[in-house]
Image (cartoon, helix red, strand yellow):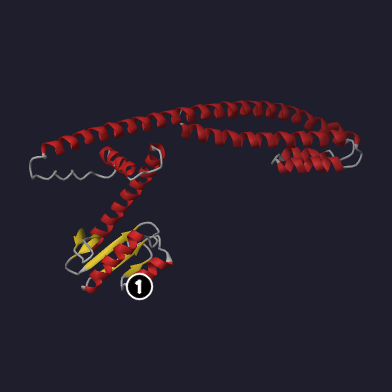
C-alpha cells in the first residue's frame, strides 16, 4: 500500500473513530439520564434522555424517553425497554471504538514506515544523481583537458557544446556543475528540489506559449536590438508584433530591467510589444513598461 492510500485510509478511520467515540459518550450520557429517571419522580431526567437521543438521531429512543414520562407505564414498559437497547448499543459502540482505535494505530505505524521507505528511496535517488553528476563532471573535465592539449599547437577553437534539453538528466547534471562553479551554497538535495520546481514551471510556460502561438498564428524567434538579441515568445513578423508571456507574477528584477530596455528599443523601431502578465506584476514593473511605451494585459488572453 502506497503512502497516499495509507493517508486516505487513516483520515477515514480517524473520522470514523471520532464519530463512534462521540456516539458512545452520548449513549452513556443517555443511559445515565435514564438511570436517574428511575429514581427521579419528575420527568426532568427523561427529558434530558430524549434530547440526547434526538441529538444522536435515535428517534425511537427519544420516543421511549417520552413514554417514560408517563407515571407507572413508563417505569413498567418504556424504561426497561430503553435500558436493554442502551446496554446493547454501548457494548456495540465500545467494540467499534476498540476496533477503530486499533485500525488507526496500525495505519499510523504503516504511514510512518511508508514515509521512512519513501525518504530512504528519495535519499538513494538523490545520492545516485549526485554520483552521476560527479562522474559526468569528471568526464567533462578530462575531455576538456584532452581537447585543450590537442589544440595547443593549432588555431582551431574548441567546438561549441551541444545544446541540452531542459529537464533531461544531462541538463540537470550540467546545471548542477555550473551551480557549483558559481560557488552555490546549497547541497545537492536542496538544489535538486528547486531544479525540479523550475523545470515544472518551465514546462508549463512552454506549453502556454505554444497555446498563444497557435491562437495568434505566431512563432517564437529572436530580434536584434542595440542591446544584443531579444528572445521573443510570440512573434508575428508580418504584423510587427512581439509578445512576451509571463505565466507567474513578475517583479522588476535586474534581468527584467534589461529585457524591458530591449523591448523599448523594439518599440522605437515600430514594433508592437506586449507583455501578457497572466498572474500580474509588481507596480515598479508596470511603471517600467508604461515608461517604455510597452503595452500589457494582466490576465490570460487564451
Camera-nearest residue between 236 and 101: 236
Q: Quadrant of residue 246?
A: bottom left
Q: Identify whether 11 is placed above or below 94.
A: below
Q: Report whether 160 appears left or right of 84.
A: left
Q: Identify whether 178 is placed above or below 255.
A: above
Q: Identify whether 202 is placed above or below 268.
A: above
Q: Where's residue 193, x and y in %?
A: 39, 41
Q: Quadrant of residue 26?
A: top right
Camera-nearest residue between 290 and 62: 290
Camera-nearest residue between 255 and 14: 255
| Local secondary structure at mark 1 | helix
Q: Quadrant of residue 44?
A: top right
Quarter the C terminus occupies:
bottom left
Q: Where's residue 47, x and y in %?
A: 82, 43
Mark 1: few, some, or many residues within 10 Å (few <14, many ≥20)? few
Tally the numbered discs: 1
Q: Residue at the far left: name it.
A: 154
Q: Where's residue 252, x and y in %?
A: 38, 63
Q: Residue at the far front: name it.
A: 153
> Do we see residue 31 in this rendering?
yes
Which residue is labeled 1 in the image? 290
Please name the residue shown 7% across and 42% down the image. Answer: 154
Please name the residue shown 16% across and 68% down the image. Answer: 238
> Do we see residue 69 in this rendering?
no
Q: Where's residue 191, x and y in %?
A: 38, 41
Q: Report whether 242 appears left or right of 74.
A: left
Please name the residue shown 89% across and 35% down the image. Answer: 72
Camera-nearest residue between 212 and 34: 212
Q: Report whether 216 appears left or right of 123.
A: left
Amino acid at each position: 500500500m502506497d503512502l497516499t492510500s495509507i493517508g486516505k485510509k487513516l483520515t477515514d478511520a480517524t473520522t470514523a473513530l471520532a464519530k463512534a467515540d462521540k456516539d458512545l459518550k452520548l449513549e452513556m450520557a443517555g443511559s445515565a439520564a435514564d438511570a436517574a429517571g428511575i429514581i427521579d419522580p419528575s420527568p426532568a431526567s427523561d427529558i434530558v434522555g430524549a434530547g440526547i437521543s434526538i441529538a444522536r438521531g435515535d428517534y425511537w429512543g427519544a420516543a421511549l424517553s417520552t413514554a417514560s414520562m408517563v407515571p407507572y407505564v413508563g417505569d413498567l414498559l418504556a424504561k426497561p425497554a430503553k435500558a436493554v437497547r442502551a446496554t446493547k448499543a454501548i457494548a456495540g459502540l465500545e467494540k467499534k471504538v476498540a476496533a477503530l482505535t486499533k485500525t488507526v494505530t496500525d495505519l499510523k505505524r504503516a504511514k510512518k514506515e511508508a514515509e521512512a521507505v519513501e525518504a530512504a528511496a528519495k535519499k538513494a535517488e538523490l545520492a545516485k544523481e549526485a554520483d552521476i553528476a560527479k562522474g559526468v563532471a569528471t568526464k567533462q573535465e578530462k575531455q576538456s583537458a584532452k581537447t585543450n592539449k590537442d589544440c595547443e599547437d593549432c588555431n582551431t577553437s574548441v567546438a561549441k557544446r551541444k545544446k541540452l534539453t531542459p529537464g533531461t538528466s544531462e541538463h540537470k547534471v550540467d546545471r548542477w556543475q555550473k551551480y557549483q562553479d558559481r560557488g552555490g551554497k546549497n547541497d545537492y538535495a536542496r538544489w535538486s528540489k528547486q531544479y525540479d520546481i523550475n523545470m515544472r514551471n518551465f514546462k508549463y510556460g512552454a506549453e502556454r506559449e505554444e497555446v498563444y502561438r497557435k491562437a495568434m498564428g505566431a512563432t517564437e524567434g529572436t530580434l536584434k536590438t542595440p542591446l544584443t538579441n531579444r528572445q521573443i515568445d510570440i512573434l508575428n513578423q508580418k504584423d510587427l508584433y512581439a509578445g512576451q508571456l509571463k505565466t507567474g507574477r513578475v517583479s522588476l528584477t535586474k534581468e527584467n530591467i534589461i529585457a524591458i530596455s530591449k523591448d523599448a528599443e523594439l518599440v522605437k523601431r515600430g514594433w508592437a510589444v506586449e507583455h501578457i502578465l497572466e498572474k500580474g506584476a509588481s507596480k515598479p514593473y508596470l511603471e517600467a513598461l508604461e515608461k517604455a511605451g510597452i503595452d500589457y494585459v494582466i490576465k490570460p488572453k487564451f
